Image (tube, rainbow, N blue to C red):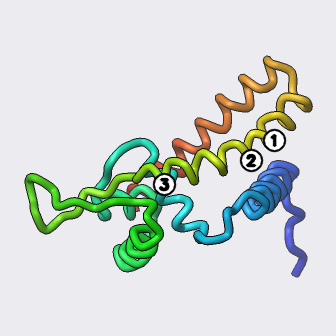
Amino acid sequence: MQLNKPSSLYDALMYLQCEFVAERNRVNPGNITWQQFDILTVLRTGSFMPSQIGQRLGMSRSKVSKNLSTLHDLGYIRQTPDVRDRRELETSLTQDGRDMLSIIDQQHKTLEEDAQQVWSEDEQEVFTALANRLIAKLRQERVAR
């Protein structure tokens, strides 16, 4: 039985994903996991309940809870009882959490600079539009599960 050769689109997406993982590993401050980094990235946009974080990231409630506990212990997040339902915890970034993400952002800036060297301004706009469409589809499918 012969397997079909992957398409060039498949290859490009897989290699791009590998490069992005390598980039994330390069700039990781070392004391958080990628799941924790993803949670902090979500919290950058506002306060969320743990269930909302889990839904957004496709993460189980137990994984969210464990990661939030660690992030709280590290001082990167605060959790306060929700005013509507005291059993729920509204989760937000602390200043330390924002500062840590800022450091990572500065290190990620090289990724943007590399893209700017490789692509013209028009190509950057096309890539941004196409990537945002794919991101929205992947997020929609994950949230619907």
Q: Amino acid at mark 2?
A: Gln
Q: Which residue is mark 3?
A: 96
Q: Is residue 7 above or below residue 70?
A: above
Residue at x-position 18% and y-position 64%: 88
Q: Earlier in the sequence, mark 2 or mark 3?
A: 3
Point out residue 101 in the picture as x, y percentages from the top left corner.
57, 50
| Local secondary structure at mark 2 | helix
Position of 1 with respect to 37 (left or right) is right
Q: Is residue 116 above or below residue 59?
A: above
Counting other residues with Cα less than 10 Å from the Cα at mark 1, is it few (<14), some (14-19), or many (20 or more)? few
| Image quarter (top left, top right, bottom left or bottom right) of the N terminus | bottom right
Task: Name the one closer to the observer, 57 or 145.
Answer: 57
Q: Amino acid at mark 1?
A: Thr
Position of 121 with respect to 101 (left or right) is right
Position of 89 with respect to 97 (left or right) is left
Counting other residues with Cα less than 10 Å from the Cα at mark 2, is it few (<14), some (14-19), or many (20 or more)? some
Residue at x-position 60% and y-position 45%: 102
Residue at x-position 42% and y-position 56%: 56
Image quadrant where residue 45 sits = top left
Q: Which residue is mark 1?
A: 110
Image quadrant where residue 80 sits = bottom left
Task: Determine contact: label 1, label 2, CB under 8 Å.
Answer: yes
| Image quarter (top left, top right, bottom left or bottom right) of the C terminus | bottom left
Q: Is residue 67 above or below residue 81?
A: below
Q: Amino acid at mark 3?
A: Asp
Q: Which residue is mark 2?
A: 107
Point out residue 141 in the picture as x, y percentages from the top left corner.
47, 54
Task: Determine contact: label 3, label 1, CB under 8 Å.
Answer: no
